Amino acid sequence: MTDEEIIREAADEKLINDAYQKLISDYESSRHRKKTDLITKAFNFAKQAHKGVRRLSGEPYIMHPIAVAQIACSEIGLGSTSICSALLHDVVEDTEFTVEDIANVFGPKIAQIVDGLTKISGGIFGEKASAQAENFKKLLLTMSEDIRVILIKIADRLHNMRTLDSQPANKQYKIAGETLYIYAPLAHRLGLYKIKSELENLSFRFEHPEEYKAIENKLRETKVSRDQSFDQFIEPIEETLKRMGLKYEIRERVKTPYSIWTKMQNKHVTFDEIYDILAVRIIFTPTSREMETKECFNIYVELSQIYRSHPDRLRDWINHPKSNGYQALHVTLMSKEGHWIEVQIRSDRMDEVAEQGLAAHWKYKEGKEDLEYTEDENELNEWLHTIKEILDDPQPDAMDFLDAIKLNLFASEIFIFTPKGEIKTMPADCTALDFAFSIHTFLGSHCIGAKVNHKLVPMSHKLQSGDQVEILTSKSQHVQPAWINFVYTAKAKAKIVSILRRNGREIQKAGEQMLTEWLKRNGMEPTSEIIDQLAEFHEMHRREEFFHSLGEKTILLGEKDLDELKGKTKKGETNGGWRKYVPFVKAKKKTDDAKPELFTVPEKFNRKKPIILTDDNIHQYKFPSCCHPIPGDDILGYIDNKNQIEIHKRACPVANKLKTSYGNRILDAKWEMRKTHFFDATIQLAGIDRRGLVNEVTRVISNQLSVDIRRLTFTTEDGVFDGSIDLRVHDREDVKSIMDSLKKVEALKEISQIM
């Protein structure tokens, strides 16, 4: 061993031991039943198993399992079983040890969790969407066995995101896309708000580095004035809380760069136009658990004496907790500076639940497993049960399945009352039919309408929080294909598709039977050639479609079908059968359209290097209509099924699906254009109508900026106008220049660019 190697090994050893000692120290200061020996045993086992292996960043591989265990311990609040599982989570996948080896050394519980983590390793997603859905199903099924599997998986993803700098750009987009699509919503659903925010922020940082940096700089620049506003705002609040004799803490909560950027995109506003960047959190220690709720509302009453409260922005998550257990009272108050500021009032117990989510609910019992939870304490049971129901009827399209799950992950909640006054939690935007299916499949499939607050409404009626709903049914009612268009929840969509598919199979079977009988009556056997010939005669591309039409009686077999068979077959020698099929082949059309030749990705193509879009090669790439990227946009490339490259904006919804389903086909892409090509862009305008306004807008664009207007549409109503302008521009700079010039037109109040 050289001196250099000895020094490096000693440095590695110190790095590893320091990280491990920090983990043990944090674990020993937690409230868990102490099993330090077991954790040390798992650490030594993992350290030996990963010996000599390094991560892309160059650090020893064992640093990753230690970091995941640290997150599980300190940031999620898990105990020794989870910490050991986190330390061992890559052993089975990356070394020669098996799940049986883990079971023999550490027992069946840790082995089960490690096995669950191994099944969903390498990210949830496989090479194709179907593999992705299969792995996602494994994840959710394992998750319903032991929720710690998904909690450790989220910890694993968080550490991978924190160390994503060492990966090439195309991998960064794939991993960031997966994180935003699945892991952040999962963390949110499990009540891990802090982790959810960090996952979103890190994804944003890697996908849109310039926007991230710009918002970070703005937050830094406005910190002094924000701190002053905070101090002025809380001064009278502190006096009141002291007078009430409460033990409290007031924290400043600043919106994350990701949530600021999302608001800027959705509302088409600038950073300076966002007024709710600052929020205030009051955390107090109640005099007793019984007084907790009352004291929350007492604080609210006192605050509304100091500041005017917004009547429509009171959120009572105390009496109606979110499905992940989150509780707090959210109120919005008008500051002396004239800005609305949200104040979150919560007890220290509620704050712990908000920080650590589900883990904060679990009871710890002497002499038992280090953390235990019972069904009535696990507030995710109902959600997990819904997921399992969807898994029982898997969608044929993997992306449909994922989107259905995602609907439920992202949904904000409303409260619906049954006729007997029971409260049911439903996603916002759900309909009466969603509610029917949430109660029972029979109610949903025979629903004819509902009574909402004693008033008759159709089944497509959207429900509001606080509605009392009675479902009306009829035995003669059956599921219709159109129903899929007016349900919102994943459960209802899955049930409708499942019932329609089952009904379709029965109709298809009946059609097949009818065809067999008709052919026998006419002295023929139902061979595949004859069936295909009849299907083609009726312009059906698939046999199943043909059988379905026969079953529904939209096709009736008759003389023309017999003539068709006789005209295109030769008579057999026995039983008058028609045995030999002469296929009819259409001649291929010749086309002389000279399209520009698209670039085809060769077999040995370096996917880690970015593709550069220039004026000379831009015609070699595909630009789908989903997002209309123009030079200056953050973009990526996607290798499609023909090995050609599509260009998408990184924030495009289609690109988000591609990142999560086909991550290995994602490429980094950059612009190097010289303002010779033109691209389409649309600017949306709104403001106060006045004479000559349209003329002024067109003069600014055409005369001052020499930009071609392709189309201009304006509508006015009651003195307010809105409109859009389609332009031909070189790049994002042109769009910004046009928008800056239009902002000087007095009557224009809202100016934004749309995809």
Image (cartoon, helix red, strand yellow):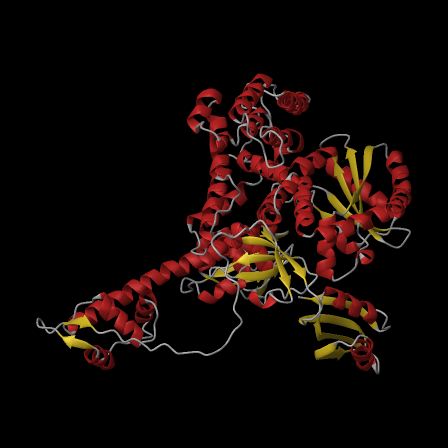
**Position of residue 124 measured from the top left corner of the image (x, y, whole percent):** 52, 44
Is residue 436 toward the left or the right of residue 341 in the image?
Answer: left
Q: Can residue 672 be spotted in the picture?
A: yes
Viewer-closest of 543 and 190? 543
Q: Can residue 419 be spotted in the picture?
A: no
Is residue 594 toward the left or the right of residue 533 in the image?
Answer: right
**Position of residue 524 measured from the top left corner of the image (x, y, whole percent):** 16, 71
**Position of residue 136 measured from the top left corner of the image (x, y, whole percent):** 49, 45
Viewer-closest of 722 and 717? 722
Image quadrant assignment for residue 481: bottom left
Image quadrant assignment for residue 688: bottom right
> Which image quarter holds the C terminus?
bottom right
**Position of residue 531 measured from the top left corner of the image (x, y, whole percent):** 25, 69
Viewer-closest of 190 and 750? 750
Above or below for 371 versus 350: above
Image quadrant assignment for residue 3: top right
> Which image quarter holds the N terminus?
top right
Q: Residue furthest top?
A: 37
Viewer-closest of 550 and 711? 711
